[in-house]
Image (tube, rainbow, N blue to C red):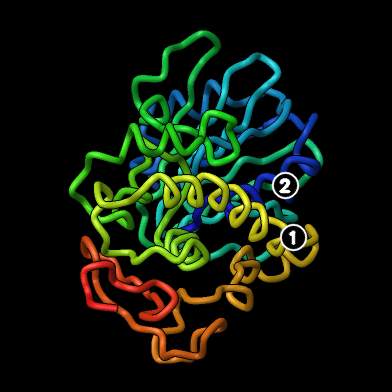
Amino acid sequence: MPELPEVETIKRVLEPQIQGLTIMNVTVKRPEVVAYPFADAFCRLLTGQTISHMTRRGKFLSIVLDSEDRILVHLRMTGCLLLTPKDFAAEKHTHIILSLSNNMELRFSDTRRFGRFWLLQKGETDSYSGIAKLGAEPFDAALTAQYLSSHLGSRKKTIKECLLEQTTIAGIGNIYADEILFTAGIYPARPANSLESADWQRLAELIPKRLTYFIEKNQITAQDYLKTKGKDYRNTPFLQVYGHAGKPCPVCKETLCRMVIGGRSSVYCPSCQHDFRASP
């Protein structure tokens, strides 16, 4: 699933290319991908509108129009947005196409069809997408040790599960939760209510730092993004633990371990992230 660094990368690649362009036509091949309003209204209301800019909130993308209407997009697990020439071979699971005034097309493809679009008109309250329920952005000044402690410090859930809750922190998924906890030296299965003030302080400092690092490593040109069809810009070479179970820890060389927490795979170093319940 694209997480905050990947979604931010998509925004940075697409925004300069689509600003100021007019949506000439809209094709929806899978109506269920448009969560609000109905697909026919979605097409009718967008046709003729001009794109102003893009924003990101957590894992959501927003395409803001000159009218102040906005298209919200959540890519979910396998969604992909590509800006392509009209004669560019379409991906097999392309569900939405916005034909633009420069003869390019903004295409949404999604193998598993979990991704969703919402169109909110100017001044319309968003009671549909769930974006209003998101917690603090990782880069907000509000994301302090006190914020984390007050929201999570009494929870019996593991700290790994807590970091994945979008209502507290927006944008962190399974990959970067593992990376953040590794850098912080915190055992991922540790109950949140067992963390101490120093732990919350480390997390508050490292969450924005690690995500910023991966955003920077994700940088890709528009040409390369299109060439790889938006699928080969992830941080795989720079991940320290995620996906590396059985390999040496990059810090201490201890073998990295895998366990399942809340139904999600988690990789950690048993030495650098010592289980606080185990004897030293």
- Please report the residue visible at 61 percent of the width from the left and 26 percent of the height from the top: 47
Mark on residue 12? 2
Q: Secondary structure at mark 2?
A: helix
In space, the residues marked 1 and 2 are separated at their CA atoms by 9 Å
Circle 1 crowding by C-alpha within 10 Å: few under 14, some 14–19, many from 20: some
> In this view of the protein, which residue sits in the foreground, 228 or 143?
143
Seen in the picture, residue 278 relative to 190 is either above or below; the reply is: below
Q: Say what amino acid the circle numbered 1 marks.
A: Gln
**Extreme residue toward the top, this view:** 123
- Please report the residue visible at 51 percent of the width from the left and 51 percent of the height from the top: 202
Q: Say what amino acid the circle numbered 2 marks.
A: Arg
Q: Secondary structure at mark 1?
A: loop
Mark on residue 219? 1
> In this view of the protein, which residue sits in the foreground, 42 or 242?
242
Percent coordinates x, y for residue 226 in the rendering: 71, 63
Percent coordinates x, y for residue 70 in the rendering: 57, 24
